[in-house]
């Protein structure tokens, strides 16, 4: 189990600088913050959210796993047999027998043409791509972690199979114990794989996380990585790619009434606030925001009395007096076990300065903070939300369940004399 104090370190350092830069009032507020008290245990929500540093250490990544037994837990002999070691891994790129695509050079185990690890690393010498991506479960309440991922664009491997016509989608599969009921699969339109929309990163055959080769626990030796998507699109233990003329997806996640084509949503979460303060005392608040497909313009907070209850006909608090928080600057050190700045050639990072070319970066996370003016005695609710680059306030423009969580986050706050 990750050490909650260890994973709070990055957020604590960033937040402390913010409040101390505000002068006397900020320094006094920082002293009230739960993050400033070394001996206090963080609340459960803080423990969960703090696992998401700018870059999350391997052991702090939260996992959503499938398989009985979990594929990476097999003995080494079995892992080698099924291709889950780097030495034995092979990837097929073949046609769908039900809806055939035309391929002039299928990559198959049977024909001895499947792509092996040596071939993938040869491609990586000239085609390797790396970028930052937050990993989030479609139905989760908080991100699982953010990493610096590296791989070869899927399109470069697909072209090795020489497709010529009748290709509408890409189906792909991870190893799941050769048990039909355990098969986990996902899909993408061929257009998304072959051509990146403006400002988007390529879909990867991913083999590294934070500079280290993937182990089995994190989907290695090779997993799919879809930058704008929720985690179920980034299938682990990748062994097979099927080019199909079917116009429909085959995603396992569709079986749970999920929207399998919804990109990452932009949303904010509260991380730290004092549970109780004195009347008139400034209140330090910090949090994290996930920057989704629609980008991030600002983070806002609002504090409302618990009584009377907020009108039921305004469930998204559109009429509340929202205030702007400050989105904090990118870090000098990104963490995650990397010894220094991000490696040269990381997409979205200026090669000269080592800083992001834009901020915030889409499909990543940011830290935010606010110093809230003191309040009269009473019981309150503290909420936060994002405003995306099109001006939509969370949970808009996609407020629906099963397409990614983005409900407005709320925590109680008590203002009273000691």
Image (spheres, grey):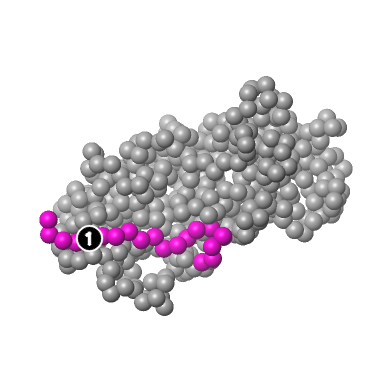
Residue 363 position, x and y percent, is 52, 52
Q: Residue furthest top?
A: 77
What span is colored magenta in the figure?
A: 399-418
Viewer-proximal residue, 185 or 183?
183
Residue 61 position, x and y percent, is 48, 39
The vertical placement of 204 against 259, above or below, is: above
Q: Which residue is mark 1?
A: 414
Helix, strand or loop at mark 1:
strand
Q: Residues within 10 Å of mark 1 (few under 14, many from 20)?
A: many
Q: Is residue 101 left or right of residue 54?
A: right
Magenta span: predominant SS is: loop
Viewer-proximal residue, 124 or 91?
91
* Magenta stretch holds residue 405: yes
Residue 141 position, x and y percent, is 46, 54
Which quadrant of the rendered structure holds the C terminus?
bottom left
In the image, what residue occupies the spot 80% across and 37% down?
A: 107
* Magenta stretch holds residue 42: no
């Amino acid at each position: 189990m990750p050490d909650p104090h260890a994973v709070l370190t990055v957020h604590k350092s960033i937040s402390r600088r913010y409040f101390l830069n505000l002068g006397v009032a900020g320094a006094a507020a920082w002293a009230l913050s739960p993050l400033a008290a070394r001996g206090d245990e963080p609340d459960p929500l803080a423990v969960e959210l703090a696992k998401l540093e700018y870059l999350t250490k391997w052991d702090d990544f939260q996992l959503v796993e499938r398989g009985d037994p979990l594929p990476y837990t097999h003995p080494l002999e079995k892992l080698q047999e099924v291709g889950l070691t780097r030495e034995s891994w092979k990837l097929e790129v073949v046609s769908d027998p039900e809806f055939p695509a035309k391929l002039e050079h299928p990559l198959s185990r049977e024909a001895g043409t499947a792509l092996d690890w040596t071939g993938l690393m040869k491609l990586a010498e000239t085609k390797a791509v790396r970028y930052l991506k937050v990993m989030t479960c479609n139905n989760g309440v908080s991100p699982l972690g953010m990493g610096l991922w590296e791989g070869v664009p899927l399109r470069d491997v697909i072209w090795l199979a020489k497709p010529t016509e009748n290709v509408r989608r890409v189906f792909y599969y991870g190893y799941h114990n050769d048990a039909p009921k355990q098969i986990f699969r996902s899909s993408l339109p061929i257009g998304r794989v072959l051509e990146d929309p403006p400002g988007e990163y390529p879909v990867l055959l991913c083999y590294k996380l934070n500079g280290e080769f993937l182990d089995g626990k994190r989907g290695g030796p090779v997993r799919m990585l879809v930058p704008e998507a929720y985690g179920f699109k980034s299938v682990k233990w990748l062994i097979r790619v099927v080019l199909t003329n079917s116009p429909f997806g085959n995603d396992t996640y569709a079986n749970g009434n999920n929207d399998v084509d919804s990109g990452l949503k932009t949303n904010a979460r509260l991380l730290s606030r004092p549970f109780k303060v004195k009347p008139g005392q400034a209140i330090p608040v910090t949090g994290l925001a996930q920057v989704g497909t629609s980008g991030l313009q600002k983070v806002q907070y609002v504090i409302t009395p618990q009584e009377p209850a907020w009108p039921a006909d305004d469930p998204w608090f559109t009429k509340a007096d929202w205030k702007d928080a400050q989105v904090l600057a990118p870090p000098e050190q990104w963490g995650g076990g990397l010894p220094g700045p991000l490696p040269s050639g990381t997409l979205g990072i200026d090669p000269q300065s080592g800083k992001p070319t834009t901020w915030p970066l889409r499909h990543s996370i940011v830290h935010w903070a606010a110093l809230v003016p003191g309040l009269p005695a009473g019981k309150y609710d503290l909420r936060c939300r994002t405003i995306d680059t099109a001006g939509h306030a969370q949970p808009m423009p996609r407020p629906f369940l099963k397409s990614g969580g983005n409900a407005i986050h709320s925590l109680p706050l008590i203002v009273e004399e000691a």
